[in-house]
């Protein structure tokens, strides 16, 4: 591998665990493989089609079933190619002008149906992700990649529109390689209807054997074409109707892993002789997002298009109190669209203050005046709106109720709209909400902001569901992402965060820590911020710790 020639700088990194498990698995010694890990999850994926799936469970399955050209390393560095580990690509070389990079693919890579993976699959996958008909949320991130072409069966050349510090990360890590022979004829505007959306065929270490809706998704270790197997036989995602049921399955021993232990259940995990509590940094932040357009998207929102109202509602919110009430010590108040574990964080950023009197003054100035029932009205219309919340998230359900109470103190009638997770995802992507209690796990590098808050991300398929647009913010982000100097990059991002905060694009609530319950019989490879499952394929269960369900699944290699 040859590093990015123009990047002679210290990488911006975040704290990470000591091992990610992203390297190709070693040949297993006799008796060292076997076992099943059962993951209890309250969220069923909408489908298993990487360009369009949004749920965390879908991402977890994708990382086990599919490959990227290369994977980000333990440091989570996204600038240049330092720390990246080979995946489908075995090596890469930069052009002298750093405007293109050539990848040489693993000649042994095969799809789970037995056919070889070739360079044409890589070019096809890039075209699929960036096709407007696909409406992939990754298209914005890939915008600087001008082309991905196959020069022979095992060689791919990626060309960039401009030199950018994150160019390698964008092309190597931001899209999965998909099988052209199975998707070539698919309607790109209806990828959710493809058979691969429910039974994916990838080239990764595991393959999906069955998906029983509302019950389970089963993956087994793949050894087609002589693939070196992982230490595990099987990974089973068991789907629960709610977080409480999912947690209970781990406590009772029915499952091995639960990724989101509530603060009020921490003591229960610590007291369980079969479990250990794994607490670490996270890239997650949650927030109340405002929709600046009305439901059809054709006109400004009658309430939230007004910056003054957004600022007033932010100042009416006791964010520190909400975080303490819900998370105790397992979260801190969020400052912006980042966490303290992120390289893009700005510890000097001061959020809008909690100031109820000022909030009332701003609402009066905006023409929203209290009536006899204490609810504010403007031109006869009451100040009322919905808070879209996923019923699968206890933390966000509690936050919605607390926000509702705090808004009422300043004359606002907010309705909690609790829906199941698939409905939440659908309404989010369709932008059919007034406000939304969302949790986001951004990419670790500075380019992650492009996914959600820029004007480009407000286009169809983007993740700027609230339709926030500000050219000054966009300009600062563009300048940051074009800078090869860390200090300059940070300075531009700091200005961008201040613009976003002053505009009150959202009410930043909490940075929750990663709090997991894991069965003690499982040897983990480390928990990486933003993707605890990154090393899951290399987790192990010692032979003397295996139980009945660890027997190899039908079709799993021994």
Image: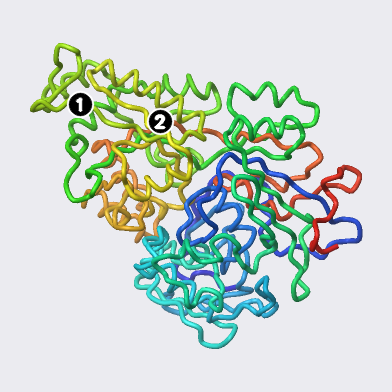
Question: Which-is-in-front pick, marks 2 and 1?
Answer: 1
Residue lying at 49% horizontally and 80% vertically, measured from the top left: 157
Residue lying at 75% horizontally and 61% vertically, measured from the top left: 221
Residue 293 % position (x, y): 22, 45
- Residue 399 located left or right of residue 292: right
Q: Quadrant of residue 132?
A: bottom left
- Residue 183 located left or right of residue 375: right
**Residue 199 seen in the figure:** yes
Residue lying at 63% horizontally and 32% vertically, measured from the top left: 245
Residue lying at 24% horizontally and 38% vertically, measured from the top left: 503
Picture disc at residue 262: none
Residue 325 vs residue 492, the one in the foreground: 325
Residue 180 % position (x, y): 53, 77
Residue 133 % position (x, y): 36, 68
Q: Is residue 319 above or below residue 372?
A: below
The C terminus: image quadrant: bottom right
Local SS, label 1: loop
Q: Is residue 90 above or below residue 287?
A: below
Q: Residues within 10 Å of mark 1 (few under 14, many from 20)?
A: some
Residue 115 vs residue 230, the one in the foreground: 115
Residue 315 % position (x, y): 27, 24
User: Which residue is label 2 attached to?
Assistant: 509
The N terminus: image quadrant: bottom right
Local SS, label 2: strand
């Amino acid at each position: 591998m040859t590093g990015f020639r123009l990047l002679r700088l210290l990488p911006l990194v975040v704290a990470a665990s000591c091992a990610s498990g992203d390297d190709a698995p070693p040949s297993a010694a006799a008796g060292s493989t076997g076992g099943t890990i059962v993951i209890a999850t309250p969220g069923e994926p909408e489908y298993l089609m990487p360009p369009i799936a949004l749920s965390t469970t879908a991402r977890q399955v994708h990382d086990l079933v599919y490959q990227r050209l290369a994977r980000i390393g333990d440091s989570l560095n996204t600038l240049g190619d330092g720390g990246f580990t080979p995946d489908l690509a075995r090596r890469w070389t930069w052009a002298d002008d750093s405007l293109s990079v050539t990848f040489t693919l693993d000649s042994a890579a095969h799809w789970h149906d037995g056919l070889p993976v070739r360079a044409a699959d890589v070019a096809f996958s890039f075209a699929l992700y960036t096709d407007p008909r696909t409406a992939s949320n990754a298209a914005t991130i890939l915008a600087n990649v001008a082309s991905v072409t196959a020069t022979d069966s095992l060689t791919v050349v990626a060309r960039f529109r401009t030199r950018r510090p994150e160019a390698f990360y964008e092309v190597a890590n931001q899209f999965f390689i998909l099988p052209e022979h199975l998707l070539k004829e698919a309607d790109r505007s209806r990828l959710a209807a493809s058979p691969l959306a429910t039974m994916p065929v990838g080239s990764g270490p595991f393959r999906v054997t069955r998906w029983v809706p509302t019950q389970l998704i089963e993956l087994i270790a793949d050894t087609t074409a002589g693939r070196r197997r992982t230490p595990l036989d099987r990974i089973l995602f068991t789907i629960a109707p709610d977080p409480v049921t999912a947690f209970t399955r781990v406590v009772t021993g029915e499952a091995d892993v639960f990724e989101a232990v509530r603060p009020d259940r921490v003591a229960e995990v610590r007291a369980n002789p079969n479990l250990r509590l794994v607490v670490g940094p996270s890239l997650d932040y949650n927030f109340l997002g405002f929709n600046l357009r009305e439901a059809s998207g054709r006109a400004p929102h009658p309430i939230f298009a007004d910056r003054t109202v957004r600022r007033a509602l932010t100042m009416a919110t006791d964010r520190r109190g909400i975080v303490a009430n819900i998370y105790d010590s397992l979260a801190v108040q969020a400052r912006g669209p980042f966490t303290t574990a992120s390289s893009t964080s700005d510890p000097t950023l001061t959020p809008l203050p909690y100031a109820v009197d000022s909030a009332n003054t701003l609402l009066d100035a905006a023409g929203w005046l209290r009536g006899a029932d204490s609810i504010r009205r403007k031109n006869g219309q009451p100040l009322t709106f919905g808070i879209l919340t996923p019923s699968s998230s206890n933390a966000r359900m509690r936050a919605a109720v607390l926000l509702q109470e705090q808004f009422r103190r300043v004359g606002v009638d907010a309705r909690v709209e609790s829906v199941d997770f698939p409905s939440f995802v659908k309404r989010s992507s369709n932008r059919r909400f007034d406000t939304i209690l969302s949790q986001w796990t951004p990419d670790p590098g500075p380019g992650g902001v492009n996914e959600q808050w820029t004007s480009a991300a407000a286009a169809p398929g983007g993740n700027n569901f609230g339709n926030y647009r500000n050219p000054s913010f966009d300009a600062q982000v563009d300048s940051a992402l074009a800078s090869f100097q860390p200090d300059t990059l940070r300075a531009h991002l700091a200005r961008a965060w201040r613009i976003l905060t002053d505009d009150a694009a959202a009410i930043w609530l909490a940075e929750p820590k990663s709090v997991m319950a894991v069965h003690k019989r499982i040897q983990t490879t480390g928990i990486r911020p933003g993707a605890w499952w990154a090393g899951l394929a290399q987790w192990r269960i010692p032979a003397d710790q295996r139980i009945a369900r660890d027997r190899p699944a039908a079709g799993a290699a021994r």
